Structures are given as C-alpha cells and as structure tokens.
Image: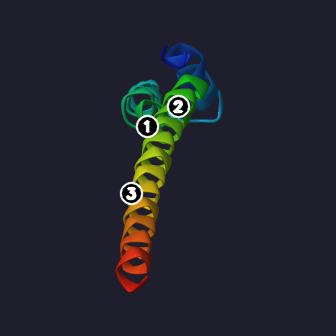
Amino acid sequence: MGIAFDTLGYSERLQTAGASKQLADEHARLARDMIIADLVTREDLRVTRDDLRAALDLAITRQTIVFGGMLAITAGLLFAAISFIV
C-alpha cells in the first residue's frame, strides 16, 4: 500500500507562495517520485517486525539445540568417567 500524495495541491500551494507554475509542478513531481517513495509505511514496519521475530525464534531454537547437545555430551562423558573410575 503506497502513500497518497496530492501533487496538484502541493503545486498550487507553491504557486500561491510565489513559485512559477513550471517550478511548482516539477517540485511536486520530484517530491512524489523521490521523497514519498522512500517513506516507510506501517505495513513495512509490520513485515520487518515479523521477519525479525521469525529470525530470532530460529536463532533461539538453534541455540537451545546446541546447548542441549553440549549438555548431553558432557553428561555422557561424566558418566563414562565415573564408571571407568569406579
């Protein structure tokens, strides 16, 4: 979903402030094409937030698996050492 930008109203306000019609029209087109195109919408933020949450959930899951594996290996080595000593 894009952002609505009233180029005609923008141009008319510039003309009212003393700019020529040609300059006001060109300025309105530039504002629409260059400035408005780079604005972030709420939808953009929502999608980015969801992507970050998914990436964080994946990272937490991977770390949990790694930690569990390390714990299991450590416990196995400890039990093997105890049975070897005893």
Task: Give the alpha-carbon distance from disc 2 to disc 1, as whole Å.
Answer: 20 Å
Provide the residue designation for mark 2: 50
Q: Quadrant of residue 18?
A: top right
Amino acid type assigned to the residue bearing label 1 in the image = Asp
Q: Gap in Å between the C-alphas at discs 1 and 3?
A: 45 Å
The residue under the point 50% across, 28% down is 47
Q: Give the number of the mark in front: 2 or 1.
A: 2
Whichever of callouts 1 and 3 sits on the residue coming sooner in the sequence is: 1
SS under mark 3: helix
Left/right of residue 10 with respect to residue 26 in the rendered view: right
Residue neighbourhood size for the residue with mark 3, other residues' Cα within 10 Å, grouped as few (<14), some (14–19), many (≥20): few
Instruction: Pick whichever, 18 or 41, lies toward us.
Output: 41
Quarter of the figure with the C terminus: bottom left
Residue at the spot of label 3: 69
In the image, residue 16 lies at what x, y percent?
65, 27
Q: Nearer the viewer, mark 1 or mark 3?
A: 3
Q: Amino acid at mark 3?
A: Gly
> Judging from the image, what secondary structure is the residue with disc 2 in?
helix
Q: CA distance from mark 2 to mark 3?
A: 29 Å
Q: Residue furthest bottom?
A: 85
- Circle 1 sits on which residue? 38
**Residue 66, horizontal then vertical, whole percent:** 39, 57
The x and y percentages for residue 23 are 41, 33
- Residue type indicated by callout 2: Asp
